[in-house]
Image (cartoon, rainbow, N blue to C red):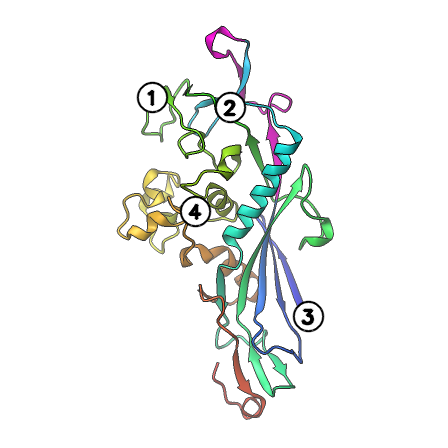
Amino acid sequence: MFIAKVAHASHDSMLQKRTEGISDPNQNAWLTVETKLALNFVDSSNPLPPMTVLAPASAGGPPRWHALDSDGWQFPLLDWTADLRTKFTNGIQARGESTWNYQFLLITPKDYEDLDVHDFKGGWMVRPNVLCLFRLRIVSPVASCNAAQTISGNLKPHSTVNVVRLDPTVNNVSRTAAPASDTDKRLTKPVGTFNGSSWRSNSANFDDSDLWKPAHNTIGHEVGHILGEDHVMCLKNTPLPICATDGNAGTTYGSNPADPSDAGNIMGGGNAVTLLNARPWTNAILRHTWCFFEASMHTELPPRRLSLNDSYEGKSVF
């Protein structure tokens, strides 16, 4: 087995291929992108100023901890229990990994030979394509893996995500000011529960309901950001001009796109993974090979093959 590893700021990657004498000439190579997350469970025993503030409770009750989302809304918090921390850890790992794992295949270029292997039993020279895999490792406070299972061999996180547990009985929230980028200038608003209209998550701050929102795969979206994905209209070959100054503007989600499918993209307002989202793997293979590989969503596409006799005579169908 041939293995090459490359470290990156937001993830590690590993390129693997079988060596000579492969038993299955239809076996492609593998490119695994792995990111390691630390989860910081924020509550009254673990506050995180300035995101968390101790504010008076409603109806003249005692002060309680609130957390500010990215639009400045203050949400009352509940404390985490050990069982809920475990449930969230397992849930984010499964949801984030399944969203991005085994979605793409990279087509090996005609002029790239380093992945070629000989299948002596079948008499073929085989040029594998590259399957794109994803591993999401939770490394703190309780690791979902051990160091030996990681590409780097250590549990140092690439990113830390703060996670708050919201009080689902709260019907209204307030804020002291609206961010300049927020077109909603209200200072109070009603909120929903687990329906995407409550806490405004981002790639560094989640809430516990992100696992259960049926309308949008928030975890998959934010893990995409952690991997370096922009919003869908900023992933285009010609991004919207506003992407240069405000990558979080509403139009970057594809809400008014020329192509209606943009709004349904995982990095827009939907859940669909498309070829626009292959960039973490096309960038990773470039770091491994210094060559551009075209991405495909046909993950079952087999390697190309040429008989050894034709290969020795200099023929090529690759």
Residue at the image position 43 percent from the left and 54 percent from the top? 273
Res 292 seen here: no
The three-letter code of the residue at mark 2 reads: Asp
Q: CA distance from mark 3 to mark 4?
A: 34 Å
Residue for badge 4: 230
Mark 3 vs mark 4: in front: 3
Do labels 3 and 4 touch, CB within 8 Å? Answer: no
| Magenta extent | 37-61
The earlier-in-sequence mark between 2 and 1 is: 2
Residue 43: in magenta span: yes
Mark 2 vs mark 1: in front: 2
Do labels 4 and 2 touch, CB within 8 Å? Answer: no
* Disc marking residue 186: 1
SS at mark 3 in the image: loop
Counting from the top left corner in percent of width and height, residue 211 is at 51, 39
Mark 4 vs mark 2: in front: 2
Residue for badge 2: 167
The earlier-in-sequence mark between 3 and 1 is: 3
Residue at the image position 72 percent from the left and 49 percent from the top? 147
Residue at the image position 55 percent from the left and 93 percent from the top? 313
The three-letter code of the residue at mark 1 reads: Arg
Residue for badge 3: 1
